[in-house]
Image (tube, coloured by chain):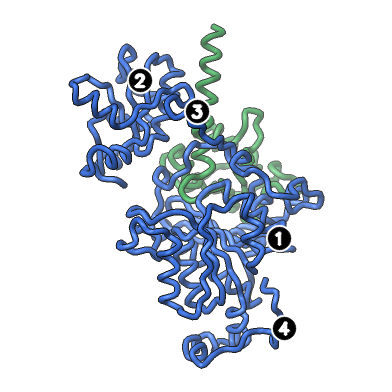
Chain colours: A green, B blue
Amino acid sequence: MTIFIPTPLRSYVNGRDAVEVNGATVTEALSELTESHPELRKHLFTTEGKLRAFVNLYLNDEDVRYLPAKEATAVSAADTLSIIPSIAGGLPGLAVQAIALARTEIHAMRTLNQEL
Amino acid sequence: MPTITEPTALPELTTDDLSRYSRHLILPEVGMEGQRRLKAAKVLCVGTGGLGSPLAFYLAAAGIGTLGLVDFDVVDASNLQRQIIHSTKDIGRKKLDSAAEKLTALNPALNVVKHDTMLSSANALEILKDYDIVADGTDNFPTRYLVNDACVLLGKPNVYGSIFRFEGQASVFATEQGPCYRCLYPEPPPPGLVPSCAEGGVLGILPGLVGVMQATEVIKLILGKGEPLIGRLLLVDALNMRFRELKLRKNPECPVCGTNPTVTELIDYQQFCGIVPETPQESSVKNGIPQITVKELKRRIDVGEDVQLIDVREPYEYQIAQIGGKLIPQNDVPQRLAEIDRDREVVVHCRSGARSQRVAEFLKQSGYPRVVNVAGGILAWSDEIDPRVQKY
């Protein structure tokens, strides 16, 4: 299937606007995407593995949240998955979040260093 | 929706109207009644910037009777690449005055209402209540959620548009049947300090595309014709010139428009979006990072001090203007720490001081003992030290 990558995340997939994956479900397709592009994972999911609140996923034109099987929905090669972050006039949610994330990581690394 | 629905209660068209709107009048979907509906309509444009410019222009041209504009900003040279309602001669003028002048020149019969203020929880309901439809041309998350919630509370349709680089989104929110912005995105992203168009960039034509789509939706709602973008999110990718459409659903658990709403009045949207107002004491030391003024930086350079100045902007920005710093773009800093001398004071700058503040905090946390941020960055340098340094 094809996963459409929004502008703010394209730098993590070599600038491409779409990535082809083979997974049998939405979850598998996303796993394959984040395994081949590990930097993407933290931008899409919380540390608990939950999709971030300002990122929406659409299987074809349907919001995955409203599909009966949600992320376990089966997908075929002809399907498309779109990642749709919130954007506001020049500063997308994802970019904002990347900054916040970098800070959290720095803090976590620092705490870890202190513990060691 | 316009409150006047009885054709008999609609304003009559003048002889001037008949000739001005003749191409509308011969459209079966508009006709005399539709044009009278447009004349009766009151539309509020929140923002007269990138989206608001084409939006307000086309609504004025189409014969909307009353057009409210909300803006508190002044025209800057960097706006003109996309905010087509303003001209070079308007630089430094209030956007409201500049926009109102262009709109009444285009259509003298238009009633322009100027709201010279920043939309806030304190004034939003009062301003919005007099209008039939609200068109959201804002560029930040707090105002976006504020407009959404106020529209839901007042039962006004919210014609939404949003842009980033080459991508745009448009939809119609907060109608009784359809979803609202919070159904789509229940929560804003974490804060990113000063939200600014400068960091992400935007193709100047894109707000034109999206703003005109918003204007189209406003007019369709007033006419009650066609299929409005209710429950649909239109995506525009200008780089590939692709339009896609996604289905939006009303979320029964939506905190504002759901069955058991928890938001029943306007809240503090700055706080909701995690933006903490600055206190005066923070101006000299912000988040543990001392702030240096451009004047102080200049003084230190002038006395021959060997300042370790790091410029964390992007290479294309460096080409526009620079003040002698070593260029290490913000995202490269973690990999290029070896190039920054830990034993010396590090002075970080960017365009406005926002990105460099974040990098300064990062360096401090990475073990650099002395890091300071240049408050105001290139912009302050251009204003206060050397106007030959190009602002952008």
Residue with the most extreme right position: B260
Frontmost residue, B311 versus A115: B311
For numbered disc 1, what is the local secondary structure? helix
For numbered disc 3, what is the local secondary structure? helix
Q: Which mark is residue B6?
A: 4
Residue A104 visible in the picture: yes
Q: Nearer the viewer, mark 2 or mark 1?
A: 1
Residue B191 in the image, given as x and y percentages of width and height: 54, 37
Rounded to the nearest angstrom, the CA distance separating label 4 from label 2 is: 70 Å
Left or right of residue A4: residue B79 = left
Q: Which residue is mark 2?
A: B337
Report whether mark 2 lies on the same chain as mark 1.
yes
Rounded to the nearest angstrom, the CA distance separating label 3 from label 2 is: 15 Å
Mark 2 crowdedness (10 Å alpha carbons): few <14, some 14-19, many ≥20: some
Left or right of residue B310: residue B196 = right
Q: Nearer the viewer, mark 1 or mark 3?
A: 1
Q: Which residue is mark 1?
A: B154
